[in-house]
Image: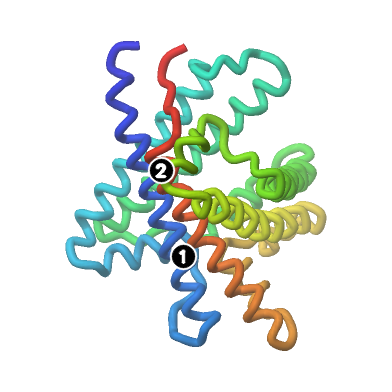
Amino acid sequence: MIGLSALEPLARAGFLVKGVLYLVVGALALQVATSRGGRMTGTDGAFTTVLAQPFGRTLLLVAAMGLFGYALWRFLQALLDPDRLGHTLRGLAIRVSFAARGAVHAVLALQALRLHRGLSASSGTSERKLAIEAFSWPFGDWLVVLVGLGLIGLAVQQVHAAITCRLDRGLDVARMRREAGEWAVSFSRFGMAARAIVFAILGWGIVMAGWLRDASEVGTTASSLRVLAAQPGGLGRWLLGLTAAGFVAYGFYQVLHARYLHIRLER
């Protein structure tokens, strides 16, 4: 399709931005786990960290462009079906997940633009506001529960994929092994498992929010890391450290996507 080829570099830039965000979040949490400062944060804190760097505002603008490109590519995957997933239940479910990823990253791009313009980025309260809005709908509390269960299901799927070495669809694993080495695959699997832990905690919080009709139960990446750090004895520090290291690994995994993923824009 004419013009869509211009999206490929933007989509790859989006993967690079995703990778940097996970690297920053993981590095900051790892500093906390090793008592070297840092803080437990999510993407909003990662954007703030980027803003504090030299040429931070320019970097944020570049990040927003990459995230918008990534979001648009995901939307096109859902609508145009270049991967030929079809209209089966499984195919439609995957295409809906593409659209959901597009929406999430469009929101992240808007966060980056807000900070670039000198405004505050939205925090975890936006998720709680969505839950409160959902409670006003018919069966809204059950919808919130289903969203949480879906996130837990995604966490289980990610753990299974990490164990069985099923990396993301379209990733040229053979070329990645050949050029980057086996460590890249192992690092990627570790990162997937670490992110799954946070997804499971987030999902459980959303389930409890729907069950109790209490939006305050909805958590964020930062609050999930705090849950791990709060475990008794020295266990919390170890769990936080492993998960933080996993986030760093997942960041590298996203950077590898920028190089080794087959990005299809036409059927």
Identity of the residue drawn at 74% across and 48% down: 156
Q: Is residue 148 above or below residue 216?
A: above
Residue 118 location (% of width, % of height): 26, 60
Q: In this view, does 176 lie above or below 242?
A: above
Three-letter amino acid code of the residue under disc 1:
Val
* Residue 52 or residue 117, whichever sits in front: 52
Q: What element carries label 2?
A: helix
Residue 208 visible in the displayed image:
yes
The residue singled out by tag 2 in the image is 179
- Residue 211 picture quarter: bottom right
- Label 2 to label 1, Cα distance in Å? 27 Å
Identity of the residue drawn at 28% across and 54% down: 60
Residue 116 location (% of width, % of height): 26, 55
Q: Is residue 201 above or below residue 179?
A: below
Residue 43 location (% of width, % of height): 45, 59
The residue singled out by tag 1 in the image is 25
Q: In this view, does 62 lie to the left or right of 209?
A: left
Three-letter amino acid code of the residue under disc 2:
Glu
Q: How crowded is mark 1: few (under 14 residues within 10 Å), some or many (20 or more)?
A: many
Residue 16 location (% of width, % of height): 37, 47
